[in-house]
Image (cartoon, coloured by chain):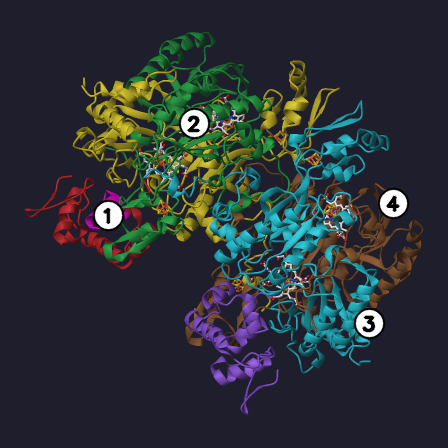
Chain colours: A red, B purple, C green, D brown, E yellow, F cyan
Amino acid sequence: MADLNVNGVFIPLDEDGFLEDSDLWNEEVALALALTEDVEELTEEHWHLINYLRDYYAKFGVAPMIRKLCKETGFNLKKIYELFPGGPAKGACKVAGLMKPTGCV
Amino acid sequence: MADLNVNGVFIPLDEDGFLEDSDLWNEEVALALALTEDVEELTEEHWHLINYLRDYYAKFGVAPMIRKLCKETGFNLKKIYELFPGGPAKGACKVAGLMKPTGCV
Amino acid sequence: MSILDQGPPDYKKMIPPIIKDNYGKWIYHEIPKPGVLKHVSETGDELFSVRVGSPRLISLDFVRNLCDLADAYCDGYLRFTSRNNVEFLLSDASKVEPLIAALTEKGLPVGGTGASLSNIVHTQGWIHCHTPATDASGIVKAVMDDLFEYFGSMKLPAKLRVGLACCLNMCGAAHCSDLAIVGVHRTVPRINDEKIAKGTEIPSLVASCPTGAIRPNPKAKSVTIVDDKCMYCGNCYTMSPGMEIMDGKNDGCAILVGGKVSNARNVPSFSRMVIPFLPNNPPRWPEVTDAVRMIVEVWIAHARKGERMSEWIERIGWERFFTLTDIPFSDKLIDDYIFSRETFRTSATFKY
Amino acid sequence: MSILDQGPPDYKKMIPPIIKDNYGKWIYHEIPKPGVLKHVSETGDELFSVRVGSPRLISLDFVRNLCDLADAYCDGYLRFTSRNNVEFLLSDASKVEPLIAALTEKGLPVGGTGASLSNIVHTQGWIHCHTPATDASGIVKAVMDDLFEYFGSMKLPAKLRVGLACCLNMCGAAHCSDLAIVGVHRTVPRINDEKIAKGTEIPSLVASCPTGAIRPNPKAKSVTIVDDKCMYCGNCYTMSPGMEIMDGKNDGCAILVGGKVSNARNVPSFSRMVIPFLPNNPPRWPEVTDAVRMIVEVWIAHARKGERMSEWIERIGWERFFTLTDIPFSDKLIDDYIFSRETFRTSATFKY
Amino acid sequence: MTEKKTPQLDELEKGQWPSFVTEIKKAAATNAASEDLLHLLERSYEDRIGHWKHGGIVGVRGYGGGVIGRYTDLPEEYPNLAEFHTIRLAQPAGWFYDSKALRSICDIWEKHGSGLTNFHGSTGDIIMLGTTTDHIQPAFDEFSEAGFDLGGSGSDLRSPSCCVGPARCEYACYDTLEACHNITNEYQDEIHRPMWPYKFKIKFSGCANDCTASIARSDCSVIGTWRDTIQIDQDAVKQYAADGLDIQDRVCDKCPTRCLKFNSETKELTVIGEDCTRCMHCINYMPKAIRAGKVKGATILFGGKSTIVQSAFMSWVIVPFMKMESEDDFAEFKDLMGRVWEWWDENGKTRERIGETIYRLGMGKFLRECELPPVPQMVFRPRANPYVFWPQDEIIK
Amino acid sequence: MTEKKTPQLDELEKGQWPSFVTEIKKAAATNAASEDLLHLLERSYEDRIGHWKHGGIVGVRGYGGGVIGRYTDLPEEYPNLAEFHTIRLAQPAGWFYDSKALRSICDIWEKHGSGLTNFHGSTGDIIMLGTTTDHIQPAFDEFSEAGFDLGGSGSDLRSPSCCVGPARCEYACYDTLEACHNITNEYQDEIHRPMWPYKFKIKFSGCANDCTASIARSDCSVIGTWRDTIQIDQDAVKQYAADGLDIQDRVCDKCPTRCLKFNSETKELTVIGEDCTRCMHCINYMPKAIRAGKVKGATILFGGKSTIVQSAFMSWVIVPFMKMESEDDFAEFKDLMGRVWEWWDENGKTRERIGETIYRLGMGKFLRECELPPVPQMVFRPRANPYVFWPQDEIIK
Ligand code: SRM
Ligand code: SRM
Ligand code: SRM
Ligand code: SRM
Ligand code: SF4
Ligand code: SF4
Ligand code: SF4
Ligand code: SF4
Ligand code: SF4
Ligand code: SF4
Ligand code: SF4
Ligand code: SF4
């Protein structure tokens, strides 16, 4: 996929639009990623979710299971899709700069 | 079993003649224990075995399996019974002040 | 704009009038000839289904072709079966033969009913998947060509259900087939540290290995494999692009037999490995087609009428299966995984 | 002084002349009456064996008594069976009845042959073991008294082999008996830190737990147990005096049925649990004797001639066993250990 | 159209079975991606490995699954396969179509995809094989318009499927199509928005012949059965006998419970009802003479899955008999599903199928916590070991 | 002799089965330990728990096993049970005795023990129940003098046992007594000096009736069999038929492989030799008419054990057929045992029975490393999973 233009700086994305190098993530990058996911603006709720994902990942080295995510953020799944139409994996994890979820499709 | 008389000091033994408190073991105690096991004197070979057992126990918290014991001391089983007629468990471990082997009888 | 969650089309709109009228009223069926089912309703109505073999991987031309035929012979209605055959649904008995003639002309085989070989349930293989140990469509084509006579006739001892899965994920659900062809890897994944470091959740990767062969390698932000513990299942590759498992020289197929899912007579059973490896020899996989034909022929020669592969083998005993087929037995065929115990012969009785 | 490694006495010196003469030459046998076997040799010789029930736990008086009888009726020769019965070996047919009369007079039962209940293989229990969940000799006596009629007759559908083990170590090898009584604990071991600290290899203790319920507790030089993971097997107690598992209020017996070891007809099978717990009610364990009698009687009423417990149950199905015996089924009877999978019904066919 | 040769694949155009190579070539005639696919496959036949990269996450707005991302590892050589994703469309129950519906699919795929499909995928979806990232959303929009929706993928409920059932089969013990359709519609959220530890499959078979292979291929198998006794029409039996069927040999001797008695003199067939396990064999052999009982419904089994990773499991009986006729019955089924999913979601590890979770934690715990009454029908045999986890409230303190 | 009462035990003197309580009382008449035992047992009947302390390590010079140490946990109340050890004496093959031998045992035990015994223990030994530490060595010395030796205990070879075999049974396919005696004598060191990961048991049964329950109760089961076809005496068959035996029903229909055909007209019984699995059923029913084949020997199975800890295992076939006649055959057996023990000793964990070691590491590895040729007779069925550990030397580099 085309690289991500963050205020003129080009950050490499993989084919699926995830960051090639998750170390390059920052809040501005998140905003730019959000646009690729049809999210026009990152509200507090978006950040609540993003921060939870990043904290969890930092702690355990993996993305949380959906049930945990819902329980601990207080958002139900419907809400999460409202925030990120691509869903928790393709949408939220991408914007949060997490690694691309693998496995089960 | 009667307590062990080590130069006049009485050290408590359990019914099977093992030290109640293995911390009380020392070389003199070993000699006294050896007598209860029909071993009149502790030769260099006896000590080789005793030391191996004690080292192993200190390291792993368990007595070695017989195969290991034979391999690593260089004594075959026959030799061990020559040294300690009570055998590795009842004889050698007792004199070495190890815990009483449990489990399989 | 899309409508979310509308669900699949309503089947009620897809069924022909004769089915609507006789829904749940069928009382018996007959198989007038191979590939043709005649279902009779309590209303007296008769429905003819003509079953047609399909390669499953098809072009839109093929689909439109089916539509044309359906329009011409059965008011535009058809269905597919759970084994990917096509079924034309005719309310008019007189159109059966003309339809068959039209099908034959187009090279579409009619069959798959009763004591026949039906279509091979299979998977993507090299066409579209990322983890195959063999191709799917190619072998299926080769085997179906080779055993073609058994699709259009009903002269087998019983149904023969063949499944193919191109890797151990077994999307072809070959694990309960009369005869299964399963793509197998035979070499330890090659670790690509960079891909792992960049694109993999290490804890999930480590946890994915069923034998605990994978250890974290924190220095490289990657992992290592204890080669001896790896049985090439490929589950780690599913978790991570950095565990490259495809190996052109050593991938191939295993053959399993004796699975079954219906509850008729004996209970469902798993397929069991009889040949641990045959090489990938495209385009026609002769080792595979030969082995399959040989097993099928020994079954035909020895089974009693009505005996499916599993029933036949369980009656004669697996030890005689190996004698009769002359397939070499090896320790590779002896289970050494979680449920191995139940496979060991805990009895002094056996045949030679 | 002792002679080391001289081995057991030579059996050749222990067998009577008639056996010496006909060793390996027997051609057939008959059971003239319950408890009496008549073996006929190709030489024409006939050997009569009179089988006598023994409580197994016996005094020297009992042994000497046997010796007296052997001296009087069979030149001093006798043997014991693999189920702890005594067999007097007579070469003189005319002495059979007098011997039986003498035995009867002494209260020694003759029987255990053919389609009968033989002696119960059992263990030490409270007589001599450190880990029992029940007594052995007491229950055996109570059950044998209750089913006494089946020892001296041959009117059962087939052999009935009962085993008793006083704890899960299963020294009575009850795991393959037609009917098994097994002592079971039901409470988590009580940890005695002092005993563990003094007398236990902690790593071995931790490793001994099959479910991984035991964790080291380095502070106390002891261990802790995750209660939820404990299934009271007692293996940790075998490793350490500090894991006290006997519990007078909660120990008791489980009943298992359908085991078999011979290869005749069907292959050997494990006994399977049908009653998870019955209380220890000495001296006569009425709950146990009642349950055993009930199961035996249902078997007698429903089995075909020649059908052992396992054959009968496998023919009618376990679900019907529960219907016929009216034993309540519970989740406790469903396996949840390593090989549970093979016990689950993977079929839509069953009875009610 | 192209210079490149495909000698190996050409071999696979020979023979009597219809050729997928011919199909690809047909698509290739008008579609560049399909043309590249032909050559990429020839390349795989040479190299004996696949040429697709690992994984891929693409999708449509509002859904978490339904599209399988795919990229070739040789994009320079096969540029039209740089993106070649698969869209899974949920099939109508029983895989029934009219030509209009099929043609509408074709038209859309001609515009947005490779021109190749699978009728059907192994789980039951229509597989639209090969499109680019840009085309996913528009293609979906149009499919949606045409009345189609996406099927499952990822850790969600996969598209349920069912046998032809009462639509064309005299054996159906419940309406598989209606059950499948009704239940599929109930669970659109579960299908489209992955939320569980792993995938979950449901298959509906109208009787124990299990024509959807549900016992092997689904986490929940719903298999038609009856509660009472088979019905025998003695006149029809006599007719079969007169027509030369060896009833004793082919039917009675193969009855697994030997509960059918054929009187060779009166030509009457009788059954010991309580012994019959409803295996379908006699009915299959003599459909005109033997029918299922009157009290019909389904057996619900759980746990089926394929080999990866703990071994293949077949589904096991959890509810021996459940009515499956009315909306109320479906509600009961859904209530059960709810409890079971809740339990699995709470207890399952990542990528653990429900069968594996139950195996790991024990059937007893599963039953207790899902409030399912234990019955002997759940097992072939009771446990052989005495390792009972004793509920501590049954213990004397 | 004593004031204390034993009301519960007294109940167990009633009834027709000979009473162990009566036996204890008999011993108690002259032995103080037995008297204490009576009361300790009554106490256990009250408390519903055993009153023996954990473990105990006592023994004789030169041996590591053969004596089970036992101490009561109530030594003050039952002082004569403060030490109450058991001595295991190895039984003669087939449990044959002359009264002289038995009396010699009695005399010694009267002097040194409680006066109680078990004829026999579950493994097969004579169990001399109850003595003090001081008496162990002298008792052993005297038993030894009288021709008896100790049996196994601990992580050693347990006393092998065998069925009555050719001594009194027409079915014996090899000389179980000679095999047992010969092999037991070969392994006196292994019996007396524990050296392995855990215990190891061998049992010898002369035919597939397995009258020692070897398949369930021993790590190595040696079960008599034959390699050719059963021998049928048609005259004797006719006699059975004439005597009223329903041969079709009781014999043919119960033959597991249905390989026996009875011609009800000619009264001839024939067998399809290659289908017979040698289960013994027909021979058991018609010993006068049917005999084993002529090429006799034994099947060697490994792995049997009881429940603790991984579940009970039954032995599985490792050598389908081995001759068991001559000293050479025994040597072959011993050679096999040597390899197997060596492998187990090298690979087994502490307290792991050989069956568990094989299960953990895989039958394939076991067979390869013990140089045993894999044959289909070893399994009921081949593996259902495709998880083959591929030998890396068969791989193309
Ligand atoms: C059309 C289809 C259902 C569908 O919704 O698509 C179907 C339809 C019928 N099945 Fe089936 N079965 C269909 C897949 C299956 C499967 C699943 C599979 O193969 O993956 C099975 C389980 C196979 C297995 O056990 O491994 C299956 C096991 C049966 C059986 C049991 C056979 C047995 O004896 O084991 C019967 C009864 C019979 O054939 O006597 C049966 C009987 C029938 C009948 C006769 C039912 C009826 O009265 O209409 C139908 C015609 C059968 C025929 O082909 O002769 N059907 N049937 C499937 C056709 C697949 C195909 O294209 O070949
Ligand atoms: C004496 C003894 C062998 C020994 O060395 O001690 C023995 C002796 C005979 N057995 Fe046995 N069996 C003896 C324990 C066993 C055992 C082991 C056990 O019970 O622990 C078994 C396996 C039991 C099981 O399967 O669970 C056993 C399974 C058989 C069978 C197979 C029965 C079946 O159909 O399953 C036969 C054949 C028969 O009875 O027709 C048999 C047959 C025989 C014969 C008829 C053999 C013969 O021709 O001499 C002997 C007389 C049997 C009788 O009692 O009617 N013997 N027999 C054992 C007597 C034990 C006792 O006191 O009751
Ligand atoms: C398309 C399809 C094969 C086909 O050609 O028909 C398929 C294709 C894939 N399956 Fe599958 N599975 C398909 C039916 C199955 C089935 C059969 C069934 O559903 O009846 C099974 C075995 C039954 C089962 O569920 O256990 C199956 C068991 C797997 C597994 C192993 C799951 C397991 O728990 O054992 C995986 C691996 C995974 O999920 O990570 C897998 C994974 C995959 C992936 C997504 C590859 C991967 O590792 O990520 C494949 C994508 C191929 C591609 O690029 O197109 N696929 N997969 C089938 C789905 C089509 C559809 O929706 O109709
Ligand atoms: C005496 C005897 C029971 C009897 O009354 O007959 C017996 C008694 C004991 N057995 Fe046993 N076992 C006896 C035959 C068995 C059998 C049956 C057999 O050999 O056919 C088994 C089941 C078969 C097997 O080997 O698996 C058996 C399986 C056990 C086990 C579990 C071993 C396992 O691997 O599953 C233990 C526990 C242990 O070894 O730590 C055990 C442990 C014990 C101990 C030593 C108790 C302990 O945990 O340390 C018992 C000593 C009791 C005492 O104080 O007298 N005993 N033990 C049997 C030996 C007599 C003899 O030598 O003839
Ligand atoms: S079986 Fe394996 S290779 Fe084949 S489609 Fe499924 S996941 Fe892909
Ligand atoms: S291929 Fe399978 S066994 Fe080998 S390392 Fe990967 S997950 Fe483990
Ligand atoms: S079964 Fe248990 S309690 Fe009974 S003798 Fe054996 S180890 Fe002791
Ligand atoms: S009783 Fe068994 S399960 Fe419980 S802690 Fe002890 S060893 Fe573990
Ligand atoms: S499963 Fe039963 S009801 Fe459904 S199509 Fe097959 S035979 Fe008919
Ligand atoms: S359905 Fe099956 S079990 Fe029932 S009578 Fe028919 S064949 Fe027998
Ligand atoms: S095992 Fe066979 S040979 Fe030995 S006593 Fe039993 S029936 Fe006879
Ligand atoms: S030995 Fe068994 S299998 Fe062989 S013929 Fe006799 S009954 Fe049949």
Which region is colored magenta? A79-99
Q: Which numbered marker is on residue F26? A: 3
Q: Is residue F284 left or right of residue D30?
A: left
On whether disc 3 and disc 1 are found on a single subunit, the reply is no
Observer-side mark, 3 or 2, equals 3
Q: Is residue A40 left or right of residue C19?
A: left
Q: Is residue F1 left or right of residue C109?
A: right
CA gap, disc 2 and disc 4? 71 Å
Q: Which residue is mark 2?
A: C82
Name the chain under label 2.
C
Q: Secondary structure at mark 1?
A: helix
On whether disc 1 and disc 2 are found on a single subunit, the reply is yes
Q: Residue E144: horizontal and vertical position, in percent?
A: 27, 30
CA gap, disc 4 and disc 3? 39 Å
Q: Callout 4 environment at 10 Å: few (<14), some (14 to 19), or many (20+)?
A: some
Give the quarter of the figure containing the N terminus of chain D: bottom right
Query: Contact (CB < 8 A) between labels 3 and 2?
Result: no
Q: Quadrant of residue D129?
A: bottom right
Q: Secondary structure at mark 2?
A: loop
Observer-side mark, 2 or 4, equals 4
CA gap, disc 3 and disc 1? 80 Å
Q: Secondary structure at mark 3?
A: helix
Name the chain under label 1.
C
Q: Amino acid at mark 4?
A: Asp
Q: Amino acid at mark 3?
A: Lys
Q: Which residue is mark 4?
A: D45
Residue at 81 percent across and 37 percent down: it is: F288
Q: Which residue is mark 1?
A: C199
- Taking depth in this image into account, of C53 and C312 the one nearest to the observer is C312
Give the quarter of the figure containing the C terminus of chain D: top right
- Could you tell which of marks 1 and 2 lies nearer the N-terminus? 2
